[in-house]
Image (cartoon, rainbow, N blue to C red):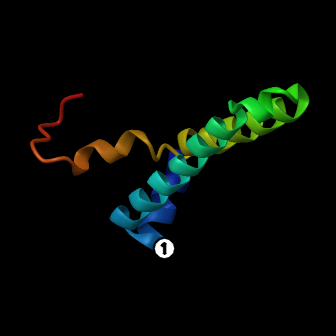
Amino acid sequence: MPLVGAYVADKYFGRLRTIQYAIKFALLGHCILVISAMPFMIAKPDVALAVFTIGLVVMGMLELFQLRPHTHNRYRGWHGRL
Protein backbone atom coordinates (compact mmCIF):
# COMPACT_ATOMS: atom_id res chain seq x y z
CA MET A 1 0.00 0.00 0.00
CA PRO A 2 2.89 2.48 0.29
CA LEU A 3 2.81 2.66 -3.49
CA VAL A 4 -0.69 4.13 -3.34
CA GLY A 5 0.53 6.95 -1.10
CA ALA A 6 3.52 7.55 -3.36
CA TYR A 7 1.32 7.53 -6.47
CA VAL A 8 -1.08 10.07 -4.98
CA ALA A 9 1.85 12.26 -3.90
CA ASP A 10 3.55 12.14 -7.29
CA LYS A 11 0.48 12.34 -9.52
CA TYR A 12 -1.87 14.73 -7.74
CA PHE A 13 -0.56 16.69 -4.75
CA GLY A 14 3.23 16.72 -4.66
CA ARG A 15 5.39 15.61 -1.77
CA LEU A 16 5.03 18.62 0.51
CA ARG A 17 1.30 19.02 0.06
CA THR A 18 0.83 15.30 0.71
CA ILE A 19 2.75 15.70 3.96
CA GLN A 20 0.54 18.68 4.86
CA TYR A 21 -2.61 16.66 4.25
CA ALA A 22 -1.21 13.73 6.24
CA ILE A 23 -0.50 16.01 9.20
CA LYS A 24 -4.01 17.48 9.02
CA PHE A 25 -5.47 13.97 8.84
CA ALA A 26 -3.38 12.93 11.87
CA LEU A 27 -4.62 15.99 13.76
CA LEU A 28 -8.19 15.00 12.97
CA GLY A 29 -7.54 11.47 14.24
CA HIS A 30 -6.00 12.75 17.46
CA CYS A 31 -8.94 15.12 18.02
CA ILE A 32 -11.38 12.24 17.60
CA LEU A 33 -9.39 10.17 20.12
CA VAL A 34 -9.42 13.04 22.61
CA ILE A 35 -13.17 13.49 22.20
CA SER A 36 -13.71 9.79 22.88
CA ALA A 37 -11.90 10.16 26.23
CA MET A 38 -13.87 13.17 27.50
CA PRO A 39 -16.00 12.66 30.62
CA PHE A 40 -19.35 13.18 28.87
CA MET A 41 -18.38 10.43 26.39
CA ILE A 42 -17.14 8.03 29.06
CA ALA A 43 -20.57 8.25 30.67
CA LYS A 44 -21.90 6.54 27.53
CA PRO A 45 -19.55 3.56 27.02
CA ASP A 46 -21.07 2.35 23.75
CA VAL A 47 -20.80 5.77 22.11
CA ALA A 48 -17.29 6.28 23.50
CA LEU A 49 -16.17 2.95 22.06
CA ALA A 50 -17.65 3.79 18.66
CA VAL A 51 -15.93 7.21 18.56
CA PHE A 52 -12.66 5.64 19.74
CA THR A 53 -12.88 3.05 16.97
CA ILE A 54 -13.44 5.77 14.38
CA GLY A 55 -10.36 7.60 15.71
CA LEU A 56 -8.27 4.45 15.44
CA VAL A 57 -9.43 3.87 11.88
CA VAL A 58 -8.54 7.44 10.91
CA MET A 59 -5.07 7.07 12.47
CA GLY A 60 -4.69 3.66 10.84
CA MET A 61 -5.31 5.11 7.40
CA LEU A 62 -2.07 7.08 7.73
CA GLU A 63 -0.13 3.93 8.48
CA LEU A 64 -1.87 2.12 5.67
CA PHE A 65 -0.52 4.57 3.11
CA GLN A 66 2.82 4.98 4.95
CA LEU A 67 2.47 8.75 5.22
CA ARG A 68 3.54 9.27 8.83
CA PRO A 69 7.06 7.82 8.79
CA HIS A 70 8.16 9.92 5.82
CA THR A 71 7.64 13.34 7.36
CA HIS A 72 10.97 13.18 9.20
CA ASN A 73 13.08 14.15 6.18
CA ARG A 74 11.64 17.69 6.24
CA TYR A 75 13.60 18.60 9.40
CA ARG A 76 16.84 20.54 9.19
CA GLY A 77 19.87 18.54 10.16
CA TRP A 78 18.46 15.33 8.76
CA HIS A 79 21.33 12.95 8.06
CA GLY A 80 19.43 9.83 7.11
CA ARG A 81 19.36 8.28 10.58
CA LEU A 82 16.34 7.55 12.74
Q: Quadrant of the C terminus?
A: top left
Looking at the image, residue 38 sits to the left or right of residue 71; the answer is right
Task: Kindly identify the amino acid type of the residue bearing the numbered disc 1.
Answer: Tyr
> Residue sitting at 11 percent across and 37 percent down?
79
The residue nearer to you, when weighing 74 against 46, is 46
Looking at the image, residue 67 sits to the left or right of residue 60; the answer is left
The residue nearer to you, when weighing 49 against 11, is 49
> Residue sitting at 69 percent across and 33 percent down?
38
Looking at the image, residue 28 sits to the left or right of residue 52; the answer is left
Task: Note whether 36 is above or below 10 in the view shown.
Answer: above
Looking at the image, residue 72 sits to the left or right of residue 22; the answer is left
Q: Position of residue 39 (x, y in %)?
A: 73, 30
Label 1: which secondary element: helix
> Residue sitting at 77 percent across and 39 percent down?
51
Task: Note whether 51 is above or below 18 in the view shown.
Answer: above
Q: Position of residue 1 (x, y in %)?
A: 57, 45
The residue nearer to you, when weighing 44 against 28, is 44
Q: Which class describes the residues within 10 Å of circle 1: few (<14), some (14-19), or many (20+)?
A: few
Tell me the residue that label 1 is attached to: 12
> Residue sitting at 86 percent across and 26 percent down?
45
Instruction: Determine the image quadrant of residue 34.
Output: top right
Give the residue furthest to the bottom.
Answer: 12
Q: Position of residue 15 (x, y in %)?
A: 36, 62
Task: Note whether 17 is above or below 36 in the view shown.
Answer: below
Query: Looking at the image, how many numbered discs can be counted on the residues?
Result: 1
Q: Position of residue 28 (x, y in %)?
A: 58, 51
